[in-house]
Amino acid sequence: MLFSKEYVGYLARQTTKKLIAGEFIETKDEPGTVEHVTAALIDELSLEDRINEDVRTILEQYQDEMRLSGASYQEMFKKVKNELVKKYKAVL
């Protein structure tokens, strides 16, 4: 994840305050709402990390074939990652 969890928490607090001030949401439990927003932001921001880990797992299974065919790890990483991004319908 590109951001620290502390910064994500700060973003969640600021986002929640602005949503409440703009009357986009109503809540009686602002700290609880901030926790939910923080969790959602962390989940979304860590998506690329999860995709990268999936790519590494897939490429690990095919490492012998890649070595025999002379395929570039970096090139295959990009290709597999693009396929997973399409599969998950993610925006990175």
Image (spheres, grey):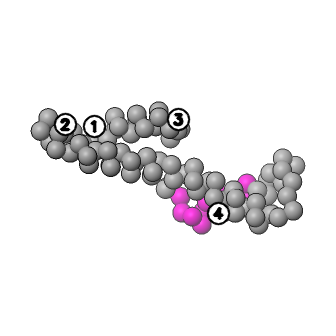
Residue type at mark 2: give it.
Ala
Residue type at mark 4: give it.
Gly
Of residues 42 and 6, the one nearer the viewer is: 42
Classify mark 2: helix, strand or loop.
Answer: loop
Residue 82 seen from this side: yes
Question: Label 3 to label 4, Cα distance in Å?
Answer: 26 Å
- Identify the residue position indicated by label 4 in the image: 9
Q: Position of residue 58 (x, y in %)?
A: 32, 44
- Identify the residue position indicated by label 3 in the image: 89
N-terminal-most mark, 3 or 1 = 1
N-terminal-most mark, 2 or 3 = 2
- Identify the residue position indicated by label 1 in the image: 75
Of residues 63 and 52, the one nearer the viewer is: 63
Does the stretch in magenta take in 45? no
Picture quarter containing residue 14?
bottom right
N-terminal-most mark, 3 or 4 = 4
Q: Position of residue 88 (x, y in %)?
A: 50, 38
Left or right placement of residue 14 versus residue 60 in this view = right
